[in-house]
Amino acid sequence: GVLARLEKGVITSARVRPADAPQADMPANLGATPPTPTTDKAFDGRALDDSFMGRIKRALDLEAHFESTGRVIVRHPIKTIAVGVVLTLIALGGNAMLEDENRAEKLWVPRGALALDQKDYVDEVWPGDLSFNAYIAYAKEEGANMLDAEYIKELAAIDDRVRALVVDGDKIKREGYQDVPSEDWEDLEGKFAYEEDKKEDVQQKCFAFGPKCGELSVLELLKSDDKVIKKLKTSQVLTAINFWEDQEYECLVTIARSDSPCIDASAWEPSAKEDACQTIERQEDRDDCRRAYNAYCLEVCPGDDSAPCRDSGCETVLELRSASQSVLANNGTFNYPAIPVDPADVSTIASSGPDGPETKSGGKVVAATHLRGAYLLRRTEIVVDGSTEDPVADAWEAKALCELGIPNPVYSDCPESELIEFTASFSRSFGDEFGAAINADIGALAVSFVGILVYLAIFLSACDPVHSMLGMSLVTVLAVLGSFGACRGIGGYIGLRNAVLNNNIPFLLLGLGVDDAFVLAGEFAKATTDNPGMAAEERVVMAIKYGGVSILITSLTDALAFLVGSNTALPALSWFCAFAGIGVLWCFFLQLALFAPCLLLNARRAEANRYDLVCCVKSKEEHPIDAPRGGCCLFSCCGFKFPTNTLEKAMNAFAKRLVTAPGKILVLIAFAGTLAGGVYGVTQIYADFKLEWFFPDNSYVNNFIALNDEYFASGTPFSVYTVEGDYFKLQDELKELGNYLRDTKFVDQDEGVEDWARAFRRHAQDTSPGKVDDDGFFESDLAFYGELVKWYHNEGSDFSSNIQFVDSNCEDADKWRSTECKAWKGLKATRIGASLDLNFTDTGTDRYNTMVQLREDITAILPGAFPYSPQFLFWEETGVILAELVRNLIVCGVVILVIIGLLIPNPRISVWVIVCIFMTVVDVVGYLHWWDVTISGVSTIYILISVGLAVDYSAHIAHIFAVSTGTPDERAVGALTRIGPSVFNAVASTMVAVIVLSFSQSFVFRVFFKAICLTVVLGGVHGLVLLPVVLSILGGSKQAGDEAPAGGSGPGADKRAPRLSGDETEEASTRTG
């Protein structure tokens, strides 16, 4: 009811005329659209220029258009609010259609990138690829030796519990994946553990290399043998560690004994050579090794109740012994399996620093403070809501992390070991920790809104229960929230995807929305000060007329720059720009549809002497706006008068000193030095992007990455994929490809090359010399494929995950010997593994150039082959991000140039606006380098935001300068006095909004803070200091009668708008803020 009466103007007081006031007191045209002028007369009686240029000028007379808009608004404020609210609610409806996108490869990989096509091939041809879930273990007692037996035993006990973890795929589907079709879930049905347990009907989830699960751990040296580990001594651990790299063939029993047959066969067979089980080049050595195995196992595993077996490997040996006895009895030859091995360096699993484990004279390992291990899972991914995932693998990883004492979103109560601390990087870690980082900082948004409310309440108006304008502060925040919700909704309607970085948009809209609110409120205050007798409706019209042009210039420039910039190759950047552009436009719309009419209702309330926020209560005392009583709403501090117009007075005094000769000289020198630092920073900044940056600083993954870099630094693993073809004819190319990988500087030769073709050639030369030439090349395709399939299922089983036959029956352990296997059809695909050298993957540019060079070299050797690693997806960004940034900045520059040129058509003014914006962007980019920020998709977004804010700070000053009159110095002082407080408040309020992000644990928000902090400081001083000085020198003079520019006219130039005279209204004794 109060709002209705406010709109109709029926609330009467000593200051407000009733709605039915006589015509003499209230002109009929108050708040109405001006009558259409005749063809030859303007509103003020001047002859209209009906020429083509005259019509163009009238069409571009934005102040006249905004005046007409303002009169519609003040005539129907409640209806205007209703229209704004209804349209915003309709826009909000699109949020239900908005889909989230959290897959990193869909956010940060440029559209059309070669790595995307390669990923599609790998996903299709090599489905269920491995998931490398790594951990680092270290003692809770600082500096303790993790190779001590007590730590190894503790690690083994934890490893046993991890391997015993079981997840139920059927239960997972019932509880969260009911909508997934049964045929898609087929491979995830049943129970899964790391290793198969046929007795319990539990399937194997590990990624197997041949018959064995892939493993990387110090426990691998001990074969994870509980029988050995139970009685383990530290000296035995060191024995295994120091023999590990000397192995040529896989040992069937433990190597954690100095008298192991694998280490010293002569300890069990006096006639044998010490290394008989490692050379086995002669049949005599093989026989000696077999006898050493038998003697050893009869001792440690007697097979009766006299003593328990102390080495599980002997169970295999005893089975082989039984098989061999009958063969030998018939004068046959029986050799125990001799499987060649290429053991990983000890330094990849145990280390005390950059140089690996601690050693003593002779290079013997004696200690290690950190141990690294990994669980290799076979992922079977399905598509869920547009994303690929393996719910069973994710569930197992969550349990495994908890077993290591690492809480995660699924399990928060995870007991830790008393001896060992773990940190890890599992496949699910990125989603868990990145989501946690973003969600943890969402609370910062609430703090920012509260800070903005407080700032608005303090600086938007007088400190008085009637004139406090807390209600308008809430309206400002609601307009920002509505704009954010509307841009998301409209994005949902048109098919945009929502990414986590869009959470930055509210901070952008806060800065722009509060800036617009201060401009409109400032113009309203100026109209009140300049025209004390003017009705509230007319003052709101004046605020919209002049303030509307200012916020249109900035909003339209920002929005177009963002919308045009959305045509970029990076999806995350494209979506952000599109959402931001829509949000900026909607924020402008709500300034007119919500803030402006509420400004009128608030003015009527204040004139009616009603309290802020509780307008149903009327004060019994007068509250002149020039004598604020302090307080807000119903609360006041009587007897204390707060000063008014403090900021305006301070800005006026500052401006007068600024335009003095010494002031101008100092400013120009200071900004020249600032620009020099920015330009040098621009020349030094470089492109770089790492996915791990998205983890919060306190994340266990960041801890893993730091420790891994310190103790186990190694290059990025990758594979060279070869496609379907006649590999018999490609033997020479395969050899050349392997040689290239072993010779090129880009590959870390210490990590070795997993070359199946080379291993197969060597095998053929040893076992089938009559079928191959001196280079190991087969002369018959049937012999090539026949021997290959035999090798694949025997000595080459470790490479079985690297080879695919066209006929899948050849990969089946039961069918490959039968006629069902047609090996002669050839190979479908193969891959060769290697790791990149760290020296060529230091920076983003290094990584990109290395990737491109590898592609070119490998394709030249074997057409169709290509190197690929999942990391390559994110290296693609580095190759395009600089070009994308430059492109978007050029687009923004062109848009700004056109809009500023149209709306401020005086070249003596507009050109310096462009220069100030350019200098601001250069300084922001340059000083971002000095603040340890690189060019990435994230920083590119924030640099574009800086362009928008820089436009705000400079365009407002230039627009008011353009409509001001007097000498250049007077115009500069007048512009700063009039609009400077609004710009200063915009700068300060934006800092209030983002300052909380300086404490963020998230890379995304921390870079956002740095970029915005530099933007508001540098952009603010360019707009408030440099631009007025330059305009005071080069902006020129303007007299009161001069024709205003087409983009708008000044108060002294535009006389066409009808105004209320002092005789038509009572003289207002108060004014609103």
Image (cartoon, helix red, strand yellow):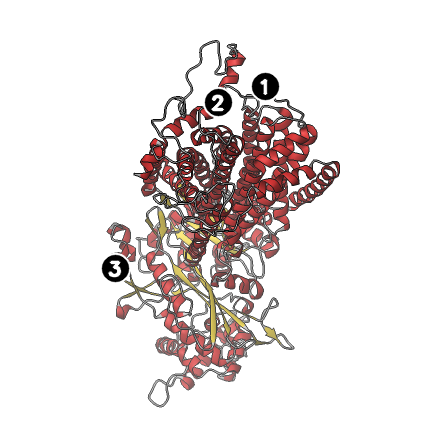
Quadrant of the frame with the N terminus: top left
Residue 9 or 202: which is nearer the viewer? 9
Which is more foreground, mark 2 or mark 3? Answer: 2
Whether residue 229 sits left or right of residue 666 in the image: it is left
Query: Quick one: SS at disc 1?
Result: loop
Query: Quick one: SS at disc 2?
Result: helix
Q: Position of residue 517 (x, y in %)?
A: 48, 38
Residue that mark 3 sits on: 170
Residue 53 in which image quadrant:
top right
Q: Which mark is first along the chain, 1 or 2?
A: 2
Label 2 neighbourhood size at 10 Å, few (<14), some (14-19), many (20+)? many
Task: Answer whether labels 3 and 1 touch (C-beta < 8 Å).
Answer: no
Residue that mark 1 sits on: 1043
Amino acid type assigned to the residue bearing label 2 in the image: Ala
Residue that mark 2 sits on: 64
Q: Which mark is first along the chain, 3 or 2?
A: 2
Amino acid type assigned to the residue bearing label 1 in the image: Glu
Query: Quick one: SS at disc 3?
Result: helix
Q: Position of residue 235 (x, y in %)?
A: 53, 82
Give the CA separation, mark 2 to mark 3. 69 Å
Give the CA separation, mark 2 to mark 1. 14 Å
Which is more foreground, mark 3 or mark 1? Answer: 1
Asked if 42 appears above or below 1050 in the picture, the reply is above
Can residue 1033 be seen by looking at this rendering?
A: yes
Residue 127 or 862: which is nearer the viewer? 127
Task: Answer whether labels 2 and 1 touch (C-beta < 8 Å).
Answer: no
Label 3 neighbourhood size at 10 Å, few (<14), some (14-19), many (20+)? some
